[in-house]
Image (cartoon, grey):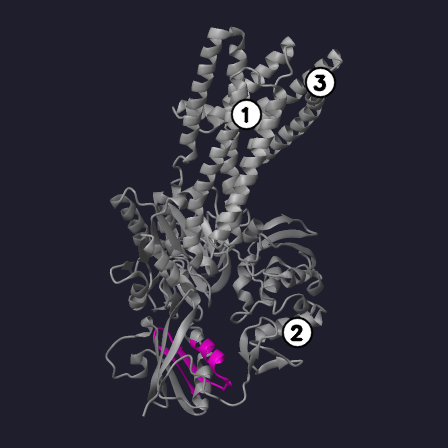
């Protein structure tokens, strides 16, 4: 009688022989060892021996299991293209006969041990002068002697110890470094310097109530303050006047219009009072306005420089390729490829352009391009599209379309990638219009009143009203609210491109999810076995077979067996991996086969069922059972979906994968949910576009992880790229979300909405300050002392309030 047993079942199999790799920490069997230390593969063992031979084993003392797993077989031929002079010229930052400088991106950097090892490369190879890491950017700068070590050897050394540089086609193009707004920093510096000195020169006047005993000294102080205010007015404040003028030309009063007016009136009245000798002016208030505004804007614009939010397809393609000419291998840049060229594509290398296979069998993984999880078998003369990864052995291919005309680049030719997003006017701008209108009414009423009772106070009351009722508190509340919210989002590994994304996020009412790698783990799965109960020997035979395979399903089964049972590896003879069908080999004189039902049972008429995650097993010709593999959904995803449905969000699912998970998704989203499978990148983009066309009020958030989602991310109002590593493999997007935080999406949206409430209350607070100031201004009795007190007190209190309020709101939302 047959038994059915699943993942949770753990029958005793004798003495446990699994352990963890001393280098990388992965679970492994205890067969590869040295010095009483066990390793998961020869690669990790060799790296340990390399570090040991060079006295660098302190690497293992700084962090627990710091090493990077050495994946696959090391092949120096992978980096042969780095001998090409054109490629070297594009990568090297500096080069002469005595030394060369190069900068690489290393996404594997994750701890202090990584930094320590990478900055001691000169100990391993004397040709390296020094190396310096940038942990935040995950970059390394290396200076080396080209006479002792080549660029190729430097990269090979990094790859061998587990830190293979991420070299892409984009590296060879024009560099687009993130722009640092040095001009604004200079403006803040000028305004801050002048403000502090003007305040210092104003202290005697504050303490003497405006009556300094020595008139000449008072005049000197006044003229010094005027001289210091000139660069603030003409240089530091210039962007407010520019922005206000652009708004007026478009017949729109933006938030900068009343600020520019307040600065202009304050400066004009101060110049008049100083030159006429009738007063000391309000230059401290004017410079204070400019300084606080500039600091607030800098704070808001300070985003995450270490992340790239604007990657295109070039960021995912390798820089070099192996070209075949007259039977000889040559290296070439991908940009130089043309139709008819023949290339070699090795195991785990990306297909650089649309090409047909001339020799060998392609085992192509399109998961990052199409979202399809399972590799596709491609034989001779079959077309393979750019962006796929070859999982099998080396194949020879002929280019059909060069990189810039390939299938994957067609997506980037869509005009959606040139469209600017989040250009809607902020909800704060209409407030500035009403604020300005109200201010003019109050100033007009004051002028009318004093024209009847004391015409000499018209000028004083009108200008004082425009000075004290500056909307800087309103602007500060918005800038510091969004700035602090960006900080809280970042603490929870949700990195927004800029503050305008917060407003766009607060308006979202429709959410579109990708499945693979977004709702599900990209590298983990649930495994269940159904069939005959297997003895220890047969479990060990299955493990010994799957450990030889590169297929993703084989790796999942291998990991499942290692974690569930105490396996002992055996020798597999005549191992074969037949692409698209399965694997087979002879172990202990018994034939073991794993694969599709048709592969196991040739009399079965159906085609491969591995697409739905079923891997059948036979030993010595007898069918034993089947491994059923399903996606493992991220923790908290069902609860998140339930919450969003309860809040009446319109939820959709777009997947490039097959429909094997349809029933599971329906259990989350409901039977009537809009769930679509086999979606190409273009179909995803069109779906988002149609969604917004049918409903003009739809504000769409797209959550995806792969290159196949790039168009949809760009077409949506807010595109969020989910990444296992927030510094790598994220297409063009508005925000990057760490994959472990996907279940917090509903909290992020609710927190974004709370920002509007905080700004509203801070605006009310600023209105109260303006009422106090205006009560003095309309009487024509606003003294410089009162203005000097009200300005900083209102600004500081507003900043304090929004900081505390946004922090409190983040805590309430569980962030």
Q: Secondary structure at mark 2?
A: helix
**Which x, y percent locates residue 148?**
69, 60
Nearest-to-viewer mark from 1 and 3: 3
Q: Tell me the residue that label 1 is attached to.
A: 238
Which quadrant holds residue 692? top left
Q: Tell me the residue that label 3 is attached to.
A: 221
**Which x, y percent locates residue 758?**
47, 41
Of mark 3 and mark 2, the one earlier in the sequence is 2
30 part of magenta stretch: no
Cα–Cα span, label 1 and label 3: 25 Å
In the image, which disc is placed on residue 652?
none
The residue carrying pointer 2 sits among few (fewer than 14), some (14 to 19) or many (20 or more) residues within 10 Å by Cα, namely: some
**Which x, y percent locates residue 265?**
53, 18
Q: Residue at x 45, y 64 (%)?
A: 344
Of mark 1 and mark 3, the one earlier in the sequence is 3
In the image, which disc is placed on residue 49?
2
Q: Looking at the image, can residue 223 be seen?
A: yes
Q: How many marks?
A: 3
Q: Residue at x 63, y 59 (%)?
A: 150
Please indicate whether residue 711 sits to the left or right of residue 112 in the image.
left
Q: Which residues are magenta?
A: 557-586
Cα–Cα span, label 3 and label 2: 73 Å
């Amino acid at each position: 009688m047959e038994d059915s047993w699943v993942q949770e079942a753990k029958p005793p199999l004798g003495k446990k022989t699994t352990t963890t790799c001393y280098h990388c920490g992965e679970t492994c069997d205890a067969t590869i060892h040295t010095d009483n230390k066990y390793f998961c593969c020869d690669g990790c063992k060799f790296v340990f021996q390399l570090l040991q031979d060079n006295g660098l084993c302190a690497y293992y003392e700084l962090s627990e299991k710091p090493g990077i797993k050495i994946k696959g077989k090391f092949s120096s031929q992978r980096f042969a293209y780095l001998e090409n002079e054109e490629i070297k010229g594009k990568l090297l930052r500096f080069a002469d006969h005595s030394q060369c400088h190069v900068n690489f991106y290393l996404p594997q950097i994750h701890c202090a041990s990584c930094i320590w090892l990478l900055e001691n490369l000169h100990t391993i190879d004397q040709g390296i002068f020094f190396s310096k890491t940038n942990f935040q950017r995950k970059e390394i700068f290396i200076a080396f002697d080209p006479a002792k070590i080549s660029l190729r050897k430097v990269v090979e050394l990094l790859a061998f110890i587990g830190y293979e540089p991420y070299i892409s086609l984009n590296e060879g193009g024009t560099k687009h470094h993130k722009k640092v707004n040095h001009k604004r920093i200079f403006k803040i510096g000028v305004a801050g310097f002048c403000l502090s000195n003007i305040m210092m020169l104003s202290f005697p006047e504050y303490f003497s109530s405006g009556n300094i005993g020595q008139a000449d000294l008072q005049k000197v102080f006044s003229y010094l303050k005027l001289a210091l205010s000139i660069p603030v007015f003409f240089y530091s404040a210039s962007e407010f006047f520019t922005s206000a003028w652009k708004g007026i030309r478009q017949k729109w009063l933006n938030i900068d219009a009343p600020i520019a007016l307040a600065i202009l009136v304050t400066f004009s009245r101060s110049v008049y009072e100083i030159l006429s000798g009738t007063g000391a002016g309000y230059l401290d208030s004017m410079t204070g306005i400019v300084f606080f505004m500039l600091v607030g804007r800098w704070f808001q614009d300070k985003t995450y420089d270490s992340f790239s939010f604007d990657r295109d397809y070039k960021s995912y393609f390798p820089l070099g390729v192996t070209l075949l000419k007259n039977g000889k291998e040559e290296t070439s840049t991908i940009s130089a490829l043309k139709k008819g060229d023949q290339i070699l594509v090795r195991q785990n290398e990306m297909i650089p352009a649309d090409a047909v296979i001339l020799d060998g069998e392609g085992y192509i993984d399109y998961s990052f391009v199409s979202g399809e999880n399972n590799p596709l078998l491609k034989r001779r003369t079959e077309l393979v599209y750019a962006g796929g990864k070859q999982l099998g052995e080396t194949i020879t291919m002929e280019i059909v379309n060069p990189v810039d005309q390939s299938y994957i680049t067609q997506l980037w030719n869509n005009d959606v990638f040139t469209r600017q997003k989040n250009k809607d006017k902020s909800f704060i701008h209409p407030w500035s219009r009403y604020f300005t209108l109200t201010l003019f009414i109050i100033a007009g009423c004051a002028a009318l009143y004093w024209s009847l009772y004391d015409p000499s106070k018209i000028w004083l009351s009108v200008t004082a009203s425009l000075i004290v009722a500056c909307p800087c508190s309103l602007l500060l509340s918005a800038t510091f609210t969004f700035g602090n919210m960006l900080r809280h989002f970042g603490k929870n590994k949700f990195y927004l491109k800029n503050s305008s994304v917060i407003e766009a996020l607060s308006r979202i009412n429709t959410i579109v999810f990708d499945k693979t790698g977004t709702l599900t783990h990209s590298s983990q799965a649930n495994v269940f076995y159904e069939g005959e109960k297997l003895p220890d020997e047969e479990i060990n035979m299955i493990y010994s077979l799957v450990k030889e395979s590169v297929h993703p399903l084989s790796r999942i089964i291998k990991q499942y067996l290692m974690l569930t049972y105490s396996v002992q590896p055996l020798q597999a003879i005549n191992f074969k991996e037949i692409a698209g069908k399965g694997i087979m080999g002879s172990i202990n004189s018994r034939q073991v086969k794993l694969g599709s039902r048709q592969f196991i049972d040739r009399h079965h008429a159906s085609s491969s069922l591995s697409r739905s995650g079923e891997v059948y097993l036979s030993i010595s010709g007898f069918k034993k059972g089947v491994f059923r593999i399903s996606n493992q959904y991220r923790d908290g995803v069902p609860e998140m979906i339930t919450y969003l449905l309860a809040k009446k969000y319109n939820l959709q699912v777009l997947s490039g994968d097959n429909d094997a998970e349809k029933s599971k998704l329906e259990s989350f989203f409901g039977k009537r949910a809009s769930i679509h499978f086999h979606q190409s990148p273009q179909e995803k983009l069109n779906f988002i576009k149609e969604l917004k066309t049918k409903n003009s009020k739809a504000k769409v958030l797209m959550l995806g992880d792969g290159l196949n989602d790039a168009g949809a991310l760009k077409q949506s109002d807010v595109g969020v790229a989910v990444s296992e590593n927030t510094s790598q493999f994220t297409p063009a997007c508005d925000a990057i979300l760490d994959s472990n935080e996907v279940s917090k999406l509903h909290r992020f949206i609710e927190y974004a909405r709370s920002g509007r409430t905080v700004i509203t209350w801070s605006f009310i607070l600023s209105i109260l300050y303006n009422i106090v100031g205006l009560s003095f201004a309309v009487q024509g009795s606003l003294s410089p002392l009162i203005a000097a007190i009200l300005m900083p007190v209102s600004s500081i209190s507003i900043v304090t309030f929004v900081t505390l309020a946004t922090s409190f709101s983040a805590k309430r939302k569980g962030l």
